[in-house]
Amino acid sequence: MARAAATEPLTARSRRALHRVRVGLRKSAVDYFRGDGSDWIALTVLLLCVPLIAATTVHVPTWCPPSALVLPVLAGGLVLRPASLFLLYTCSATALVVESAVLGPWDSGPGRVTPGSILVTAAVGLAGLLIAQFRSRVGVPWMRGHTMLFDLRERIRVQSELPPLPEGWHAEIALRPAGGQSFSGDFVVATRSAGGRYLEAVLTDVSGKGMDAGSRALLLSGAFGGLLGSLPPHDFLPAANGYLLRQDWAEGFATSVHLVLDLHTGEYELLSAGLLPAMHLVSGAGRWDLKEAEGPLLGVYDGAKFEGVRGRLRSGDVLMLYTDGLVETSDRDISEGIDRLTGEADRFIVAGFRGAAWRLIDAVAKDVNDDRALLLICRD
C-alpha cells in the first residue's frame, strides 16, 4: 500500500486532497446554516476583509473611506455568534487605529478617520451585537430563522386546504390576514370521514389578529386537525374546549364552527362555539337563511354544551361560513355587515360561486384591519 501511494501521480493526490477540502467546506457551511456547526468560515472571511479594507482606505481614501469598515461589521452582526463578533470588533477597532495613525489627524484633510466615522461604525456594531444576542437566545441561526417562518406559514396554508370533493360539489376558502401580514388568527381544518361520505370542516377565529395570534392559530390548527375525524362530531367542540382550557393562555379563547356535511344527501349540521351564524342560500327561493347554532366561546369554562342546527343543501344551494372580520367594523354593526355580504354574494348567483371567495372579501372587507376568513360550499 505504501509503495502504491508513493507511485501514485501527484496530480491524482492533489485532486483527492482538493476534493476532501471542498467536501469539508461544504459540510461546514451546510451545518452552519442549519444551526449545527461553527461559524469559523464566516469569521475567517470577515477577518480577512478588515485588513483588506483598511489597506484600501490608506491608499485610496477618496474611494474607500474609513467608514467602509461598517460593511464587515454589519455582515458579522447577521451571520456570526456573539463570541465571534467580539473578535471581529476588536480587529475592526484596531484597523481604525492604524488608519488614523497612517492618515494623520482627522482635521488634516478629507479621507481621515473622523469622530463621525467612529460613531457610525460603533453604532452599527452595537446594533449587530443586539441582533446576534437575540438570535442566540432564540437558538435559530440567521438564515434558518427565515426558513422556519416560511415553513410555519406553509404549514398553516396546507392545513387550511380542503380535501377533494365528489362531482357535483364545490368548496373554496379564502384567508386574508390583518395588515397584509403572512400569519392569521383565522384558520380552517377539514377532512372527509366515514369512508369519505362526510365532509367535516372547522372554521376558527383565535383571539387577537395577525402575527399576535398566528402562533396560537398554528398550535390550535394542528390540535384541531388531529381531533377532527377522530371523534364523533358532537364530541369535537367539547374536546377542543378542553384543549384550550388546558393551555391556560392569558388570552386563550376562540370562536369556532364545526360543519358536518353528508355528501350523498346534502344534509348538514352546524355546531357553533360563538362564531357568527352561517348563511344558507336557498336557490329555489332566492333568499339567504340564517343558520345560527348555540354555543359558548372555546376556552372560557369547562363542561360547555354546544347545540347544533340542521339543514340540507339541494341543487344550486350555497353554504357560507365566515369570521367577524368580514362583517364587523367600528362604524358598522354585524347585521349591516351580514346584509352587505349577502348582497354582494347575490351577484354570483347567476354566474356561479366558483372563485367567489376572494372576490367577496375584496368587495366587503378589502381594507379592514382584521383577519378575515370565508368558506363557501356549493352544490351544483
Image (cartoon, grey):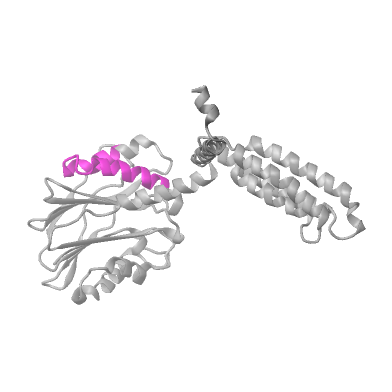
Question: In the image as oriented, which residue stretches furthest toward the left?
Answer: 265
223 magenta-colored: yes
Residue at figure coordinates x 21%, y 76% from the top left: 351
Q: Residue 149, image x and y in percent?
A: 45, 48
Tell me if 135 is positioned left or right of 360 in this view: right
Q: As rendered, which of 51 and 174 lies closer to the eye?
A: 51
Is residue 249 visible in the rendered image? The answer is yes
**Figure quadrant of the C terminus:** bottom left
Is residue 223 placed above or below 322 in the rendered structure? above
Magenta region includes residue 380 = no
Residue 250 location, x and y as percent?
43, 41
Residue 375 seen by the camera: no
In which quarter of the view is residue 278 placed?
A: bottom left
Residue drawn at x 22%, y 69% is 353
Magenta: predominant secondary structure element?
A: helix
Magenta region: which residues? 215-242
Q: Position of residue 52 (x, y in %)?
A: 74, 48
Q: How many marks?
A: 0
Image vertical order of residue 3 relative to residue 320, above or below: above
Left or right: residue 357 versus residue 147 is left
Q: Which residue does the image show at 53% across and 30% down from the upper left? A: 7
